[in-house]
Amino acid sequence: MTCNHHDHSHEHTHEHSHQHAHHHHPEDKDNTENSIEHDEKTLRVLLVHWINHNKSHQETFVEWSKKAVAMNKPEVAKYIEEAVAHIDKANEMLIGAKKHM
């Protein structure tokens, strides 16, 4: 799927997993444990996906920051570069979360 709400030169997919709440009775302990195990596996995959997805956008931001400089738009470049720094920080947090899985 092409991401149509912003311009960039690459295509990527946005995969989203939606979990629906299921009410468990106390006697459904095995089902609850299986659900937690499934959610943990899903979260591990999502953390890696989010980190890689952020890096993909970050590459595009860097490219467009350079283009903004070439367009004599240093303030635009400065804000884009600040966004890149925030992505770095977000990825540090996601990597930390992954280490604690």
Image (cartoon, rainbow, N blue to C red):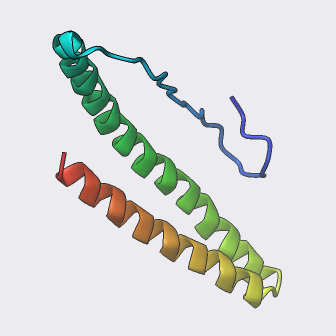
The residue under the point 59% across, 69% down is 62
**In the drawing, does residue 62 fall left or right of residue 27?**
right
Picture quarter with the C terminus: top left
Foreground: 26 or 86?
A: 26
The residue under the point 49% across, 66% down is 87
Residue 18, image x, y percentages: 52, 26
List the single residue furthest toward the front.
26
Q: How many numbered circles does the render carry?
A: 0
Foreground: 34 or 86?
A: 34
**In the drawing, does residue 60 fall left or right of residue 35?**
right
In the displayed structure, would residue 84 be above or below residue 25? below
Residue 55, image x, y percentages: 47, 56
In the displayed structure, would residue 51 be above or below residue 73? above
Foreground: 58 or 83?
A: 83
Foreground: 95 or 63?
A: 95
The residue under the point 55% across, 60% down is 59
In the displayed structure, would residue 45 be above or below residue 73? above
Picture quarter with the N terminus: top right
Quarter assignment of residue 91: bottom left
The residue under the point 79% across, 41% down is 4
Residue 82, image x, y percentages: 58, 80
